């Protein structure tokens, strides 16, 4: 499978990146993990406006779902005719939240999306075996493990340190993990990881490669985050960029 980073800015758009959106494709099937603020732009730049076969929203913070509302226009009013409903996996509130953001709370979006409520467990999406579990964040949030042809990609979503994330990432070839906070400062509890904590989870899970994401450019320091992660994980580490591709 192949991972394409579309947006990777943490919490709000950065000067050079939209918010979280990651396209994973295998066997010609394209699954979009999160659809955060502004990510329709890199979707068009690095993939294509209609290059999505399913969407999985890890949680309903705007930086992970807002463009799923914007995207309604692109599918419903396409000049060549409306596109068929697109499968969207997410928290149970996803239909109401996406419709409310679109100002169509009473009309619904069933003509644009087919919604499936996530629960912890394993299920197929296209060619992928998908496992999701609740991670530690102030709203209902799912970490994601994707398996295809014996290869594994785990995506942390947004989370504070938790055992569920270590289980999801166990033996993963690539671990795409948030590192929102700086180490050595007084961070609010139970929301996000630091670089050191991302590295610790990678080590405990025995992953092959650690990709750091969801850094908050305005408040953070890439150099400090990378240094902290390197101190707690001995394997290869990268901070992801929009447009970066990884064969897994
Ligand atoms: Zn976030
Ligand atoms: Zn969040």
Image: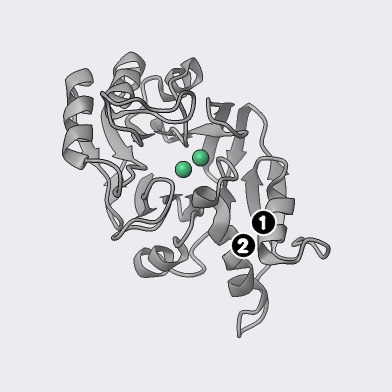
Instruction: Using the rendered view, name the quadrant where residue 151 is placed.
Output: top left
Residue 98: image tag:
1
Left or right position of 238 against 17: left
| Location of residue 247 with respect to 209 vertically, above or below | below
Q: Which residue is drawn at 49% across and 24% down?
A: 190
Total numbered labels placed on residues in the image? 2
Badge 2: residue crowd in 10 Å (few <14, some 14–19, many ≥20): many
Quadrant of the snapshot with the C terminus: top left
Measured as percent of width and height from the top left, residue 135 is found at 53, 26
Residue at disc 2, secondary structure = helix
Measured as percent of width and height from the top left, residue 241 is found at 27, 51
- The residue where tag 2 is placed is 69
Instruction: Using the rendered view, name the quadrant where residue 16 is placed.
Output: bottom left
Left or right position of 223 against 244: left
- Circles 1 and 2 in contact, beta carbons < 8 Å: yes
Quadrant of the snapshot with the N terminus: top left
Q: Which residue is drawn at 58% across and 41% down?
A: 59
Of the pair 244 and 93, the residue shown nearer to us = 93
Residue 34 visible somewhere in the drawing: no
| Mark 1–mark 2 distance (CA, rounded to whole Å) | 5 Å
Of the pair 92 and 225, the residue shown nearer to us = 225
- Ranked by sequence position, the earlier of labels 1 and 2 is 2
Residue at disc 1, secondary structure = helix
């Amino acid at each position: 499978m192949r991972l394409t980073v579309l947006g990777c800015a943490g919490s709000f758009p950065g000067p050079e990146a939209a918010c979280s959106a990651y396209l994973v494709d295998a066997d010609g099937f394209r699954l979009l993990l999160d659809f955060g603020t502004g990510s329709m732009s890199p979707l068009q730049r690095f993939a294509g406006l209609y290059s999505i076969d399913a969407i999985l929203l890890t949680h309903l913070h705007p930086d992970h779902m807002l463009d799923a509302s914007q995207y309604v226009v692109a599918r419903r009013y396409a000049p060549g005719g409306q596109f068929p409903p697109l499968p969207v996996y997410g928290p149970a509130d996803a239909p109401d939240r996406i419709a409310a953001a679109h100002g169509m709370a009473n009309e619904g979006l069933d003509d644009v999306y087919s919604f499936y409520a996530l629960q912890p467990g394993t299920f197929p999406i296209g060619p992928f075996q998908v496992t999701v579990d609740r991670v530690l964040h102030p709203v209902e949030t799912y970490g994601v493990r994707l398996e295809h042809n014996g290869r594994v990609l785990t995506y942390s979503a947004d989370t504070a340190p938790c055992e569920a994330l270590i289980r999801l990432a166990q033996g993963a070839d690539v671990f795409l993990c948030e590192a929102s906070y700086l180490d050595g400062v007084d961070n609010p509890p139970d929301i996000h990881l630091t670089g050191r904590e991302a590295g610790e989870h990678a080590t405990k899970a025995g992953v092959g490669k650690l990709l750091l994401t969801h850094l908050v450019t305005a408040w953070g320091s890439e150099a400090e985050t990378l240094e902290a992660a390197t101190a707690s994980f001995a394997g290869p580490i990268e901070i992801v960029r929009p447009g970066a591709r990884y064969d897994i």
